[in-house]
Structures are given as C-alpha cells and as structure tokens.
Amino acid sequence: MIKYLIIKVTGKCNLGCGYCYYMNDLAEPFRRRMARETITEIYNKYAEYARSHALRQVVFCWHGGEPTLLGKETFRWMLEKQAECLGDGLQVRNLMQSNGTLFDDEWAELFKQHNFSIGVSLDGSAESHDVDRPYHNGKGSYADVVDSLKVLARNNVPFGVLTVMNPELNGRDVFEHHYALGIRNMDFTLPILSYDSFEAIYGQGAVVKFARFMCELFDAWVEKNDPAVSINSLENLSRMIAGGASRHCNTTNRCDRYITVEPNGDVGICENARVIENTDNHPVDYYLTKTNIATHSFDEIEQAVANNFAVHEYNRRGELCLSCSVKDICNSGCSVHRYRKETGFQNPSFFCELYKQVISHIARFYQTELGKITIGEAAM
Ligand code: SF4
Ligand code: SF4
C-alpha cells in the first residue's frame, strides 16, 4: 500500500549544494513549480485510494528543490485543500524537508496549525556547512539556517536536523556542535551515490573515514547520555543489534514504501534511485515508474512500483551478503549503494566495510555495558 508520498513541489532551490543529486542533474521537465491542479489531483486520487483500501493514515513529505520557495500563500492553500479533500477518516501527517533558510514566525504558525514536523539540513559548523551548502552567489547559508532553527524552537514546532556525513570531519565535533545549538533530534546520512560515482568523488579510502565518523558520533552520543537526544540511524542499528526490528529503509532491504511525485506529476520510487545510471546513461530509467498523477490511479501507481522493483530486482542480494555474519543487521544497506552497471544490485554495499566496523563498534559497546549482546564473528 502507498502510505508515504514525497511531493516535490518545486524543482528550484535557492542554494547550490555541491553534492545535491537532485538540482545538479535535473531534467528540464522537472524544473518547475507543481501546479495547483496536480496537487488537487493527488489529494482526490489518494482519497479514493484510501477509501477503497480502508487506509487510516498517510504521510505527505513536502520536498523540493526548496519547498518554501512556493511561498506561504500557496502552502496555506495546499493545506486547506488537503483538509477539504482528505479530512474524513484519514489521519494526515505533514513533514517538510527544507534547507532552512527562509523560515519566519508566520511559517512557524502555519506549521503548527497543520501539525508539521520539519527536517532541516545542516552540515556541521559554519566552516563546513558554508562550503557544502552555499547560495548561488557563493555566500554561505549557515547563519540563516541557525536563525530558522531558532524560529522553529521558539514557536514549539517539532524539528530535526539532517546532516550529510563528511569523512574529513570528526563525528564527535559535529555532534557537539549540534548539541550546543540545542538540537536534540538529529540524524546523519551517507552520501547518495552509486558504486560508479562514489570513488570518483570521494577518492580511495573514504569508506573507512565515513566509518570512523560514525563511530566517533556513536561514542559522543552515548557519552552524552542525554535521553532527550535522538539519532535515528544509530538507534536503529542499536535496536537491531539487540535483536529488534529495523525501522530504517536502509536496513530492511525494502525500497517500495515511498513514492515520489515530481513537479510535473510524474511518479518515481524512492527519489534516491534517481542517481542510478543505467548502461545507456539515462539515470531516470531506474527511478520513474512511467505513471503520472494526471493519468493514473493510485492502484495503477502501486502496481507500477511493484513492477519496477520486480524488473530491476532492487532487493536482490549477492552471495557475499547472504553468507555475511551481520547480514540480518546490515541487510545489505541502501540499494543505491549496491548498484553497479555490470552486475545491477546483486553486490554488497560499497559501504560494506563501514557496516562491519560500525556494527562491531556498537555491539562491543553494548557487550561491555550490558554484557549480553552477541553478533556474528565477522563483525567482531
Ligand atoms: S556487511 Fe557487507 S557483506 Fe554483510 S550484509 Fe552488509 S553489505 Fe553485505
Ligand atoms: S533506495 Fe535507499 S533510501 Fe531509498 S528506499 Fe531504498 S534503501 Fe531507502
């Protein structure tokens, strides 16, 4: 069932981040604002789908480009329309992923009124953030992001910060930086690249540096021992090491839980798949489902997503993973990190060494602290 929709309301952004897989490779049809007709179509068709399948909850994750570039008036209209079309019997959760440069009290009021949770991108201190996340004129965005976080905090809007890990930084320093800013809900992500582009961008040996970053981060987090601090990806690995279930797509080997709606109504699977290049060098082939909100029902979209996964075998794991001692924790990681032109998805993640080192590091901590966690030998 489709229960999580990433809605790309605009293909434009006021920042020019060097690593952005969306803006830096965006095909012309997506460089636009989503029309009000498209938004209305999404609501009406989803209402029909939810009714016919007796669905009770849906998540709308407002995304871009930078979604706030649509302006408050348009957002107000979208949210009123949402209540009008989806209000009856369906619980709607609104999320927004933003670069956090444009929030003010009026935005915060709107977020509160419609029960939003906001994710803001912040890549560490001004020094590193401003290099990675500048405006188009080269000026850094750090000061504006920090101002926006203060706006959200003083208006009691729930928010978290998402940080792209930087192998040249120390995970502990980044954690302490965020903590000092008052951020308690934080998460850290690996760069979204395929085998074919990772080494060209980060160079040899980078995986081990990413692993070091994550271990430093974990150590800083547990030493802080503040129950108010949440780091979703580390909590997830900890839970799995202790025998619990995964709550993170990267460690479930399931990629069919999200759909992405582009500004022109085209529907893709998880948008991270857009970085995968096929042999003819058409990255969108793996990503798009050849359906559009204007012409397809959600039942048809669901079927197209299933076909896409079946044809490309996104979740097919290789022999090495199937015989790996931490295979049930790592679950081969994000499919994008397993893709290679020659062999498709049937490879270990190129972050394999990171998973082994980080799982081992976390497990050792819990073994020492709790004395009862056991995991496979290869990780120890
Ligand atoms: S640690 Fe490596 S080999 Fe083991 S499941 Fe993960 S990607 Fe596969
Ligand atoms: S492609 Fe990666 S990020 Fe997207 S759903 Fe699959 S595992 Fe998650």
Image (cartoon, helix red, strand yellow):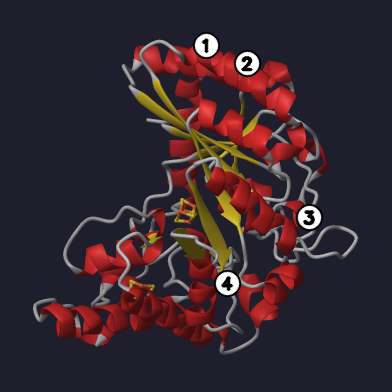
x%, y% of residue 38? 67, 21
- What amino acid type should be assigned to the residue bearing mark 1? Cys
User: Residue at point 34% right, 59% down?
Assistant: 228
Q: Is mark 3 on a helix, strand or loop?
A: loop
Q: Where is mark 3, residue-wise? A: 15
Q: Is mark 2 on a helix, strand or loop?
A: helix
Going from N to C along the chain, the mark reached first, 1 or 4, is 1
Residue 343 in view here: no
Q: Where is mark 4, residue-wise? A: 195
User: Residue at point 53% right, 10% down?
Assistant: 84
Outermost residue on the right side: it is 137
- What amino acid type should be assigned to the residue bearing mark 4? Tyr
> In the image, is 263 to the left or to the right of 183?
right
On whether ligand 2 comes within 8 Å of the CB at mark 2, the answer is no
Q: Residues within 10 Å of mark 4 (few under 14, many from 20)?
A: some
Q: Which one is in front in this view, the residue at disc 2 or the one at disc 4?
A: 2
Residue 28 in view here: yes
Q: Where is mark 1, residue-wise? A: 85
- What amino acid type should be assigned to the residue bearing mark 2? Thr
Q: Residues within 10 Å of mark 1 (few under 14, many from 20)?
A: some
Going from N to C along the chain, the mark reached first, 3 or 2, is 3
Q: Where is mark 2, residue-wise? A: 40
User: Residue at point 39% right, 63% down?
Assistant: 233
Quadrant in which residue 128 is drawn? bottom right
Q: Which one is in front in this view, the residue at disc 1 or the one at disc 4?
A: 1
Going from N to C along the chain, the mark reached first, 2 or 1, is 2
Give the Cα separation between the discs numbered 3 and 1.
Answer: 33 Å
Q: Which one is in front in this view, the residue at disc 4 or the one at disc 3?
A: 3
Give the Cα separation between the discs numbered 3 and 2.
Answer: 28 Å
